[in-house]
Image (cartoon, rainbow, N blue to C red):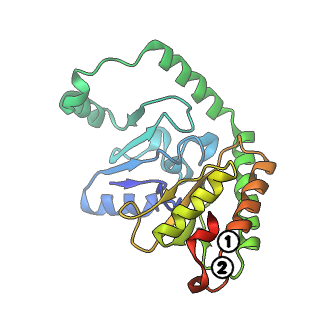
């Protein structure tokens, strides 16, 4: 059981290696691709398709699930797998058996979202441009700082700060500048790795990214982290 794109670091699971382990040990692979579906892979079909393991040729060992509330722009989620696995879920998932069906309006909205994903190559290319712009700019302004931007190739760009109070202070400093980036702290992430979770989208403009980079440059600590005090962000 694994995320396909991990939600705090933006790193991508090696699904081919995981599936190989499942084949070796006669196991199933439950893959949650909520942050990859619509973004990664051909036509945004997700991490499984990106690894060449999706579509009608997908292994019957894989149970693939993803959110419909992120790239698809709706709500809820879906599960896909072999006929046997899906029938087992329909019969055994107690919370689903007596659930009210999704409204037709939501189904129609999701159909439009899926159509947009299928035709969204230009939007995905634009997102990759914004990711590259952010990574280049942050690397430039934070040179010598103890802050560190993760190496994610996805829309999730974690800026590791370290201390909880410092991460909160940076979040507040950005909020005062009209920019919302949440601070993520333990126990959601390991001790000492409090961070800003920057989530980009194709709707962000180059000017938006430049504004964020400039704000981070204003808030960045001195090279020696021991001389920095969180009040400097206020």
What residue is shown at x 51% (from left), y 59% (from top)? 12
Label whose residue precedes the other's in the sequence (2 or 1): 2
Secondary-structure class at tag 2: loop
**Which numbered dot is residue 220?**
1
Residues at circles 2 and 1 in contact by the CB criterion of under 8 Å: yes
Q: Position of residue 168 (x, y in %)?
A: 52, 62
* Quadrant position of residue 133: bottom right
Q: Nearer the viewer, residue 68 or 171?
A: 171
Q: Position of residue 167 (x, y in %)?
A: 53, 65
Q: Is residue 197 above or below residue 220?
A: above
Q: Position of residue 196 (x, y in %)?
A: 56, 60
Q: Nearer the viewer, residue 21 or 172?
A: 172
Name the residue that disc number 2 marks.
145
What residue is shown at x 70% (from left), y 56% (from top)? 131
Secondary-structure class at tag 1: loop
Q: Which of the image's four quarters has the N terminus? A: bottom left
Q: Taking 205 as reference, is 46 left or right?
A: left
């Amino acid at each position: 059981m694994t995320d396909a794109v991990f939600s705090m670091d933006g790193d991508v699971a090696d699904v081919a290696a995981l599936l190989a382990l499942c084949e070796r040990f006669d196991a199933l692979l439950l893959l949650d691709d909520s942050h990859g579906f619509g973004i990664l892979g051909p036509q945004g079909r997700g991490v499984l398709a990106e690894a060449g393991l999706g579509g009608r040729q997908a292994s019957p060992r894989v149970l693939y699930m993803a959110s419909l509330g992120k790239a698809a722009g709706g709500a809820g989620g879906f599960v896909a797998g072999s006929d046997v696995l899906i029938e087992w879920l329909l019969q055994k998932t107690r919370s689903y058996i007596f659930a009210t069906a999704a409204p037709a309006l939501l189904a129609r909205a999701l159909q439009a979202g899926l159509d947009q994903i299928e035709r969204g190559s230009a939007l995905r290319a634009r997102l990759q441009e914004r990711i590259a712009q952010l990574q280049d700019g942050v690397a430039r302004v934070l040179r010598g700082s103890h802050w560190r931007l993760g190496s994610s190739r996805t829309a999730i760009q974690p800026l590791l700060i370290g201390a909880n109070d410092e991460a909160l202070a940076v979040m507040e400093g950005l909020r005062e500048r009209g920019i919302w980036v949440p601070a993520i702290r333990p126990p959601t992430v390991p001790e000492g790795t409090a961070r800003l979770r920057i989530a980009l989208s194709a709707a962000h403009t180059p000017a938006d990214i430049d504004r964020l980079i400039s704000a981070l440059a204003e808030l960045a600590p001195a090279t020696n982290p021991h001389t920095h005090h969180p009040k400097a962000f206020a």
